[in-house]
Image: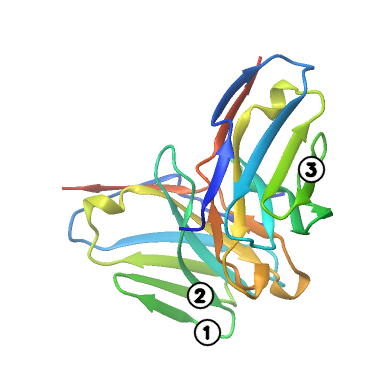
Amino acid sequence: DQQVKQNSPSLSVQEGRISILNCDYTNSMFDYFLWYKKYPAEGPTFLISISSIKDKNEDGRFTVFLNKSAKHLSLHIVPSQPGDSAVYFCAASRSRSGNQFYFGTGTSLTVIP
Amino acid sequence: DAGITQSPRHKVTETGTPVTLRCHQTENHRYMYWYRQDPGHGLRLIHYSYGVKDTDKGEVSDGYSVSRSKTEDFLLTLESATSSQTSVYFCAISLLAGGPLTGELFFGEGSRLTVL
């Protein structure tokens, strides 16, 4: 059973506009969340993370929002650039339990020049 | 750059044959992981290691075994490959001193395995 879900397999956005990628989780024990970016034929690369004690974390053009009551997180990319075109995975963990990170199925973002 | 390399990068094999994938790191990180990526499933943890000869199962460990006889190498073995094991396999290490609880995994470039 998929504990982390990304319900939009793909998203297209115009360059310069905002990209919003969504992620839902089912396990209320998750308390650490991450976003990874993946280009074809490469491994995923870490983008940004957030702990459950926060509801927002920013890093440059990337902001992650966490809504614990809704078990929902989102990644905002502003402004979107063509180089942002990639597959984005969200992931979650129960940090106190150790080593398992649960990944979503990914959203393929295309930024149109 | 965490200096992580996977080999082979591509392999085609037949059902029932054994396959070993190798993950090599150059920076002495304690924690290493094997994931598989499949359409519709994202990345799923197969096995992980928290030190030499210390390994544990992930969520999809059936049909796989691992070994870690030295810090720099983490081997994933399919004793008898099946078509359901056709996938892209990623090795990962934890970069931060706090280990996996801090969350930042660094992934290798992947090994694409096709089982006919």
Give how far across and how far down residue A96 sits, in percent.
Answer: 74, 75
Relative to the observer, which residue lies in front, B95 or A14? B95
Q: Quadrant of residue B53?
A: bottom right
In the rendered image, which quarter contains the N terminus of chain B?
bottom left
Relative to the observer, which residue lies in front, B12 or A79? B12
Q: Residue at x 77, y 70 (%)?
A: A97
**Mark 2, residues whose alpha carbon is within 10 Å: few (<14), some, or many (≥20)?**
many
Give how far across and how far down residue A40 sits, in percent.
Answer: 40, 39
Q: Quadrant of residue B80?
A: top right
Q: Is residue B23 left or right of residue A111?
A: right
On what subunit does the disc labeled 2 rest? A
The amino acid beneath tag 2 is Leu
Q: Which residue is mark 2?
A: A66
Q: Which residue is mark 3?
A: B66
Q: Which residue is mark 1?
A: A54
Residue A5 against residue A99 in the figure, above or below: above
